[in-house]
Amino acid sequence: MRVQLIFWLLLLLLGAAIGDRYGLPGWARGLTDRGFSSVESWFGRLDEPIPAASENEESNTATEDDAAEEDVVEPGDEPPASAPEPASGDLGNAANAGLHMNDAGLTIIKESEGLRLEAYNAGGKWLIGYGHSRTAEAGMTITESEAEQLLREDVRGSEDIVKKMVLVPLNENQFSALVSFAYNLGAGAFSRSTVLDALNAGDYTQAADNFRNHNTGGGEVIAHLVERREKERALFLTPA
């Protein structure tokens, strides 16, 4: 196509230079007229609009665009309606969400657990500091400040347990007493305790008295647990 176009253009230019209309004899004029018509028709096609896409193509394009927009989820958007609801065990009482164990509660744990700066084995488990076990190992030694830091890290798990399981609002002293209690019992025993039962029933006074129900080990009353429960009960009853 390009070779033909160049050929007709040359004839057209030649005729324009040397003839009246195209400056050529009759036998050649027909060739240049054909060249003129070919050039004119070629440039005429260049001016034609590009054919529109078919209705089916437009419909498909619109559908794909709509689908793409629906799939885009910007940060901060609401989750889909099908997103699962949080488990009931994760709810607790929203009023307790910002609470943390205070120094009075930490003191109860410190006095009850005792401080050991060298790792020791108890019941087949290595412990260090104030009963810390997660990173304890044979031959390990720490400072007193490190022992307190480990204790503060350890009680976070018990803080979460209390926040999740207690359904009534607490003050700081009540919360700290319960964290000490849960830290000693563990999540399972705390969830079954008479303290939690009374508290979630809204009976704070009975909950305080029920600390005294949890001072045994192996079916026997243990003196240091009796002392610890009295301290926890007293803190629980102390106005914040």
Image: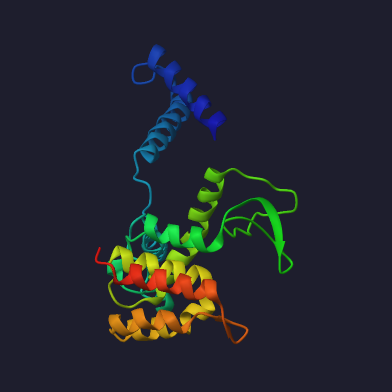
> In the image shown, does 102 or 51 lie closer to the viewer?
102
Colouring chosen for the image of the structure: rainbow
Q: Quadrant of residue 230?
A: bottom left
> In the rendered view, would you say 38 is above or below 144?
above
Q: Residue at x 41, y 66 (%)?
A: 56
Q: Position of residue 227 (x, y in %)?
A: 47, 71
> In the image shown, does 160 or 33 lie closer to the viewer?
160
> In the rendered view, would you say 215 is above or below 131?
below
Q: Position of residue 224 (x, y in %)?
A: 53, 71
Q: Residue at x 56, y 78 (%)?
A: 222
> In the image shown, does 3 or 122 lie closer to the viewer?
122
Q: Position of residue 233 (x, y in %)?
A: 37, 73
- The answer to whether one can see residue 5 in this image is yes
Which residue is farthest front? 223
Q: Residue at x 52, y 59 (%)?
A: 154
The quarter of the image holding the N terminus is: top right
Residue 94 lies left or right of residue 160; in this view the side is: left
- The answer to whether one can see residue 101 in this image is no
Q: Residue at x 48, y 76 (%)?
A: 226
The quarter of the image holding the C terminus is: bottom left
> In the rendered view, would you say 182 is above or below 8?
below
Q: Position of residue 34 (x, y in %)?
A: 44, 33
Q: Quadrant of residue 197?
A: bottom left
Which residue is farthest top? 18
> In the image shown, does 17 or 62 lie closer to the viewer?
62
The mark tally for this picture is 0
